[in-house]
Image (cartoon, rainbow, N blue to C red):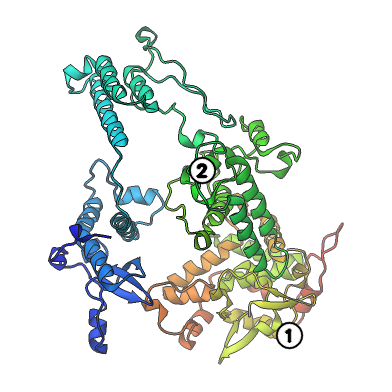
Amino acid sequence: MNVSRIVSLDVQSDVSPDAEIISAKKRNRKLKTRSSGLYLVRSGGTYLFQIRLPKRIGGGAGSRPIRVSLGALPHQQARELANALGALAPTLFREIEKRMAGKRGPNSKTAKDLSDEGVADEDWPFDFASVFLKAALYDIVQPPRAPTPAEAEGHEMMRGLVRIGRELSAKQAGQPHDEMIADHAEVLASRHVAKYQAAASPVSISEELYTSVSAPLAPVPYQPLSSPLPEPTPLTQPDTESGSKDKRLISADVPAAFQLDRRTVERPASSKPLFSHVASNYLAKRKSSKSEENKDISIAEMRLNLFAELIGDHPIDTYTATDLQAFIDLIKYWPKDVKCRPAHLTAREIIASNQDYRFETMARKTLEEGYLAVVKAALNSGQVDHDYRPIANAKLFYPDLARPPVHTQPLAKAKIEKVFQTGVASGMFDYAFLPLIGFLTGRRLGLLLHLQGSDFREKFDGVWVAQTSGIVLSDGKWKRVPIKNTASASFFVLNNFLAEIGLVQWAQERGDQFLFPELMRLMRPSKSASSYMGRLFEKAGIEKSRGEVFHSFRSGYIADAGDNNIERRDRKMQVGHEVGDDEHDKYGFRTLTERKARLLASLPIEVDLSMFRGLDFDEFANAKRTLGRKPKATALPKAGGR
C-alpha cells in the first residue's frame, strides 16, 4: 500500500494552533519510553490515530479525543497513515467552522440541519469529524480502481448527456443557457449516443438516458409485490396545450432500486454462507446465553423469517442498504395487530391486503428498533467467522404513517399526589409503594419489582441503600433480574422518608422474600408490572398517550437531582446509568461516596406524602387480588404505626 503521495512532510505546521494534537509523546516522556509519534498512540497490538477538535469549534484540552483505529500494522505503515490523516485535519476543521458559521456550499449542512437528522447540537462536530476521518482512511487504504475502457466510455457518454439535459432544463426554466445545445438537444443526444454505440454493443442505459433528455418520463405505478420491474411506458412528447409537466431529466416517478423485487435482483457471485445460516447461528448464540425460555428470541426469529421471505435468502455478503430500504418499503403495510395477519396468507399477501391502510400499521420505534434492529444485528453477526463488510451508516427513510414515539413527559405535582392517593386507597402493596420507591430513587420499574428484603442495608450511619445482586432465587430456580446494564446492579440511595415511615425496617424483616410477591408470581413479572402501573395511572385520571407514565418518575428524579446541584456523574450512578466512556469519568469510585450518598438521602421532597404515614405494611402486603370483586378500598393506619 502506497500512501506517500498524500503524506505531508510538515503536518504540524498546517494544523491550527488551537487544535489539540493527542500523542503518547508527553506521557512517554515521563516514563522514558519510546513514543509512537505525532497523532499516533498504541493500544495493545493496534495503532490509533488521535486528535482533538480545536477550541474554536468545541474542542480543547478538556474535550474527548477523536480516535480512529488503524489496525494491527507495522509502525512505519501506521506512521504514514497517521501523517496522511493529520494532513487532512486543517481542511476538516475549516469545513466544520464554516458550517458552524452557517456558510453553506451546495452540499454543506449547518448545525441545525445535522440536529434535524438526529445529531445533538453539541456533538455534531465530533461526529462529523469522526465520520470524515474514517472515510478518508478507507479511501487511503482502499483507493478506487481505475475504470475499464468500457466503463470510461460509458462515463464519458453519461457526462455528455447530463450536460445536454442541464442546458435544456435551464432553457425551459428561463435561466441562462447555451442556445446551441438547448435548441438542438434531441439531435445532439441522438448523435452522442450513436457515437458510442457504433464502437461497441449497445449500452442498456443509453436508451433510458436519451429518452430522459428528449421527452418527459411518464409515471410508472409502484407495484411492490411484482417480481420483475415493469417495462417502461413508451415516452411521447409533452402535450403543452393540456398543461402537462415540462420535460425533466430527473423524476420521482421512476422506480428506485429498493422498489424492485429484491428476491430476484441480480447479485454478485459469492462463496459466503446464506443469510438463513448466519441468522440461525445468531439466534442460537442469543438463546444459549439465556438461562430460561425468552420470548424475545421467538419474536426475533419471526422477524428474521419475514425478512428472508420478503427480500430473499442470499449469500450474506451480497446484502446492501438497498435491501434494508426495500424491507421498510414493504412492511410499512404490515398490520400492527396479529389478528389482522391471517395465518393462511403469505407475508406478501398480507401486505397486499393492507395497501389501502385498512389496518393500523406499526409505529416508527417498532420498525426501527424492533424489525430493522434485529435484521441488522443478524446481517452483521457473521463478520468474524466469514470476513465480510457490514452494512453501516446508511440513511434510511421511514413512512410518514409510522407513528413517532411518545416521549416521557414530567408529571405535575398534583398528578403525582393523585397517583399516590389512588395507590394507597387501593389497599394493594404494589399500587401503593412501587410508585413511591420509584419517585424517591429514580430506579427502573423492572429492578424495583425484584427487590428482596435482604437487598436493604444501612450503608453509612443513618443512610440506607438498596442493591440487587442481579441474580435471585424464585420458585426454587435462580433467575436473572432484568437489569439493563452492570451499572444497574450498584447500590442506590433511599430517601430518608422511606426510613421515617418504617418501610426500610419492615423490608429488612422480610429477609429473602420479595417485596412485591403478588406481581412476582406472574408469568412475566416486569411486563405485568408495567401493565398494572398503567392501570393505576388510568385510575388516577392520567392519560398514557401524553407520555405521562411510570417512567416519568425516573426522568423527574434525574431532573430534580440536577436542580438540587447533584453532579451529573452522581446522578448517573444513583439511577443506574453507565458512567460513560470519558477518560476522566473512569477514575474514582464506581459507586457513590458517603458525602454524595448523604446529599441524595436528604433531597428535599416538594410533594405531599402524608398519606404514607402510619400505614400498616403487613395489611397491605397480605391483600390479595381477586376476580369479581375489588380489594379493600383502604388500609386504615394503626395507632402509632410505623
The amino acid at mark 2 is Asp
Residue 615 visible at all? no
Q: Residue furthest bottom?
A: 461
Q: In the rendered image, which residue does mark 2 sit on?
A: 323
Estimate the x, y position of residue 638 in percent, counting from the top left.
77, 79
Q: Nearer the viewer, mark 1 or mark 2?
A: 2
**Looking at the image, is 45 positioned above or below residue 5?**
below
Q: Position of residue 546 (x, y in %)?
A: 57, 51
Return the residue nearer the eye: 407 or 411.
407
Residue at left 42%, top 84%?
588
What label does residue 340 carry, if any? none
- Count of numbered circles in the view: 2
Q: Quadrant of residue 300?
A: bottom right
As drawn, the residue found furthest toward the top would be 241
| CB within 8 Å, label 1 to label 2 | no
- Under circle 2, the secondary element is helix
Residue positioned 51% across, 59% down in the render: 386
The relative height of residue 121 versus residue 321 in the rendered view (above or below) is: below
Instruction: Please give the residue where the numbered disc 1 appears in the rendered image.
Output: 511
**Amino acid carrying mark 1 in the image:** Gly
**Splitting the image into 4 quarters, where does residue 29 fall?**
bottom left
Quadrant of image for the C terminus: bottom right
Mark 1 vs mark 2, CA separation in Å: 54 Å
**Furthest-right residue in this view:** 628
* Image coords of residue 373 (percent x, y): 55, 54
